[in-house]
Amino acid sequence: MKPDSKTQKNPKIRNAGVNGRFPDLSGLRDTGAGLRRALLHPVRSVPLAFLAVILLGAGLLMLPAARTAAGTDPLLPALFTAVSAVCVTGLVTVDTATFWTPFGQGVILGLIQVGGFGIMTLATLLALLVRKTIGLRGQLVAQSETHTLNFGDVRSVLFRVARIMVLFEAVTAIILTVRFWIAYDANPGTALWHGAFHAISAFNNAGFALYSDSLISVADDPWIIIPICAAIIAGGIGFPVLITLLRGGVRMKDWSVHLRLTIYGTLFLLAAGAALFAAFEWNREQTLGPLSFAGKLLATLAGSVFPRTAGFNSIDYGAAAPETLMVTNILMFIGGGSAGTAGGIKITTFLVLGFAIWNEIRGRDQVTIAHRSISSSSQRQALSVALLGVAAVITGTQLLLMFTDYSLDKVLFESISAFATVGLSTGITYDLPPSAQWVLMALMFTGRIGTITVASALALSSRPRLYQLPEERPIIG
């Protein structure tokens, strides 16, 4: 058969098929594969970068100037603390207030700041990389919905994140400093140090505190609890949402699906968590019972906010009711918003799966949220992140049960807290053997770095199949 003249003139459609009607897309596929490989390279190097920061921080914490106790083996406490700080978790095997010197506490604070800033910018930039792989129409839709992200201006994104972090941390630090100075007879230097430390720890959802009982001794002080809760929510809600709210001018009816899921999901979880926490702990003598009515309200607010991956505690979770621990487990595992300092599987992941289940129950083929359809790839990514999280928690729980003699409820609480980078504990972290500490370090690292990396890698590596296989329907359920 004589080839079509257009085929001879245009090399892009050479070897096209019958009469040149189907152009050869192999060149485009090769270009797309190269782009995906280039984008996936930084994603794969992320764990190594965070690991390098952890090792540097551990080395600094091993210095004699960082510890108050001489003669102790610093390796494991230093490494565990460095992992917890960089992964903004807050779990500790030694008392931050007494074991570390001001120099050591300064190193911890630096690791928290680096970890929080790195995670926030990393998640945001990876979101840009993911959006860059979609078509022009998809890019325009994504940018019009977020009102914030522009792939071509990475430097602007970094400066915005830095400015937001400094703003919230500075405002929170000022409030806390004044309160520590006036109400707790702290000298100006100590008040400033405590205010800055807890402000940075709060905004980055780290949960490190300079008091041996965390925030239990100030559980009824609104000038401390409320600013810390506000900083936690601001840091954990996610940069794309936060910058949109700060800019203003966006009507609620014009909110994107991501903005709706994050805002409404956060409000619902805060309200539901507070209601359940109050119902289970209001009259318990070991927790909220001794507090005044106003103190109970503050502790209830904290009991709903802190499990959203912050790690502070205003009650002793070792004395909490089993029902409270279960609710806290759920809040910890869900976590906060995407592209922020919070951990967990994220609110959007949880709600996308919830809407998928609801639409399946109603017999709908398409998952819709706020008059927008959710792509099947987004649903698969949400399912993958959630199931990988479940697998990590189950594996960690099983290993902790093997290495310790603690009950299942305490071990499960510890595993979820580590994976979701929360930092809450029922009090068993201090007494864990080295093998169990290594398990928690792996969970913290996986929960913080793994979820971002896996979610981004799944999105970046997805590519359309150019053919369709025969369909079958296995029996489900």
Image (cartoon, rainbow, N blue to C red):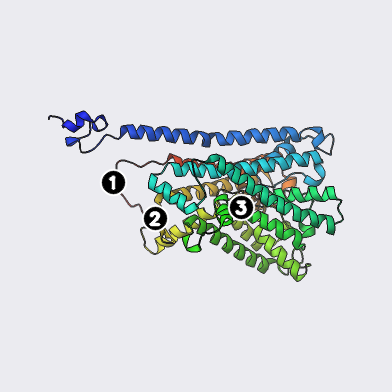
The disc at residue 476 is 2
Mark earlier in primary sequence (2, 1): 1
> Which residue is most to the left?
1
Q: Which residue is mark 3?
A: 236
Q: Nearer the viewer, mark 1 or mark 3?
A: 3
Q: Could you tell me which secondary element the residue under label 3 belongs to?
A: helix
Side (left or right) of 415 relative to 141: right
Residue in front for this viewpoint, 167 or 238: 167
Does 223 sit above or below residue 448? below
Q: Look at 50% across and 62% down and name the residue there.
A: 251
Alpha carbon of mark 3 to alpha carbon of mark 2: how far? 37 Å
Q: Which mark is residue 123?
A: none
Q: Is residue 166 left or right of residue 96?
A: left
Extreme residue in the front direction:
249
Q: 271 left or right of 465?
A: right
Q: Amino acid at mark 3?
A: Gly
Q: Position of residue 366 (x, y in %)?
A: 37, 57
Q: Residues within 10 Å of mark 3 (few under 14, many from 20)?
A: many
Amino acid type of the residue tagged 2 in the rendering: Ile
Residue 235 vs 283, above or below: the answer is above
Instruction: Between label 2 and label 1, give the one nearer the viewer.
Output: 1
Residue drawn at the location 23% of the way across and 38% of the way down:
22
Mark 1: secondary structure? loop
